Amino acid sequence: MRILAAALAFALLANPVYAQNTGSRGAGKGRGSQNSEQQKVDQQKKKAAEDAYKAGLKMIPDAKDKYDPWKNAR
C-alpha cells in the first residue's frame, strides 16, 4: 500500500514538472525554434532594460552617513 501511495504521489508531482519543460509556445517547441531576427529583438530589449536599470541606479543619491537602527536602544 505504501508503494502504491508513493507511486501515485510521484506521478502527481512529475506532471507539473513535465508541463514546465514543454515551453510556452506549445508542446515540443522550445527556445531553439526562434529565428535570428527574433533573437536580435530579444537581445535589444534585454540591453534596453539593463541600460534603464543602470540609469536608475545612478539616480539614487549616496548616503551621507550610515543608518544605525539600534542607536536609540544603546
Image (cartoon, grey):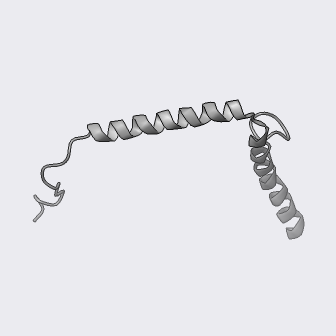
Between residue 55 and residue 9, name the one nearer to us. 55
Between residue 15 and residue 59, name the one nearer to us. 59
Residue plotted at (41% across, 34% down): 52
Query: What is the quadrant of the C terminus in the image?
Result: bottom left
Residue 59 x %, y %: 27, 37
Residue plotted at (37% across, 40% down): 54
Image quadrant where residue 9 sits: bottom right
Residue 63 x %, y %: 18, 48
Task: Identify the residue at the far bottom of this view.
Answer: 2
Q: Is residue 43 left or right of residue 31?
A: left
Residue 4 to residue 44: above or below: below
Image quadrant where residue 45 sits: top right
Residue plotted at (40% across, 38% down): 53
Query: What is the quadrant of the N terminus in the image?
Result: bottom right
The total number of labels drawn is 0
Between residue 7 and residue 17, name the one nearer to us. 17
Residue plotted at (81% across, 34% down): 26
Residue 44 x %, y %: 55, 33
Between residue 3 and residue 64, name the one nearer to us. 64
Residue 20 to residue 74: above or below: above
Q: Is residue 21 left or right of residue 59?
A: right
Q: Is residue 42 left or right of residue 10?
A: left
Residue 2 x %, y %: 85, 69
